[in-house]
Image (spheres, rainbow, N blue to C red):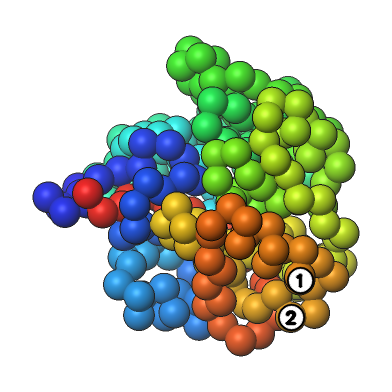
Amino acid sequence: MPTTMERFLKKPNLPQSQATFCALSEEHPAILEALARRGLTLWPVTAEHALPSPIAAHADMLLHHLGENRLLAGNYRLAAEGERFGFCVQKAERMPAGCYPGDISLNALRIGPHLFGLIEKLDLILQQTVVGEGIQLHRVPQGYSRCSVCVVSEKAAITADLPLAGAMEAVGIEVLRVPPGGVELPGYSCGFLGGAAGLLAPDCLAFTGTLQGHPAEEEILQFLYRHKVSPLFLTDGQLLDVGGILPLKEQV
């Protein structure tokens, strides 16, 4: 459970203060260590072997934060772990497994009152829960919606996916459109920027590596500066898609 000095994030992906607890893949010790040195408690997500090995431990494939202490988990093991961390966890009805689109049942992008994804392939509990809470669903052709988008704030985001960019802009989110590339994901031609980042505070966006060599390095830095968000580079290597850094608890 959160201590008296921390609370669960009210809005998924959008800490209102300094994050204290994050979930991310266990397979990248340098990134885990960099976050731990900054005082964060970590939930190292273990691999789900029903998924392809390059993404088997990706948090954005296996967990979906519904807000506050509520989570959807992609297997029984993660559900049990989440409960030990104080979350009220439901196991997904449509557990992510196999290759696309069987792997995307929890991979939807939540920004404030909006959820973007390939709706018909999402977990039914996820769909029913967000609809019941008045969250607007937006169907986009990109099944990997969560990892495709780097959330900067409730009103700002970065993506290389043009349909997703258009859908976000249609509801008033300012989007920096960047070319694909500049993010490694072993086993794939490239990774996604959202899978290589995560907000650690309203004014701090952590990246798994540096932006050096990214085709939109300067544009990204200028966009962050304009939105009063500072980049934090956790390693000095190239950006690596690790399935995102998911903030789940924050300072009171």
* Residue 159: x %, y % from top left: 76, 50
Q: Secondary structure at mark 1?
A: helix
- State which tag comes first along the sequence, 1 or 2: 2
Q: Which residue is mark 2?
A: 212
Residue 121 percent location from the top left of the image: 72, 29
- Element type where label 2 sits in the image: loop
Circle 2 packing at 10 Å, graded few (<14), some (14-19), many (20+), is some
Horizontal and vertical percent for residue 128?
53, 17
Q: Above or below — where is 239 with respect to 79?
A: below
Around disc 1, counting alpha carbons within 10 Å, would you say few (fewer than 14), some (14 to 19), or many (20 or more)? some
Q: Is 189 on the left-hand or right-hand side of 128?
A: right
Label total for image: 2
Q: How far across and how far down the image is residue 7, in percent?
A: 25, 45
**Residue beneath disc 1:** 217
Specify whether residue 95 is in view.
Answer: no
Q: Nearer the viewer, residue 173 or 182?
A: 173
Q: Quadrant of residue 103?
A: top right
User: In the image, what residue occupies the spot 33% across and 67% down?
Assistant: 40
Residue found 16% across the figure and 54% down from its top: 5
As shown in the figure, which amino acid type bears the numbered disc 2? Gln
Choose between 227 and 117: the one closer to the eye: 227
Q: CA distance from mark 1 to mark 2?
A: 6 Å
Marks 1 and 2: CB-CB under 8 Å?
yes
Residue 194 versus residue 97: which sits nearer the camera? 194
Q: Quadrant of residue 10?
A: top left
Q: Amino acid at mark 1?
A: Glu
Residue at image x 68%, y 29%?
A: 172
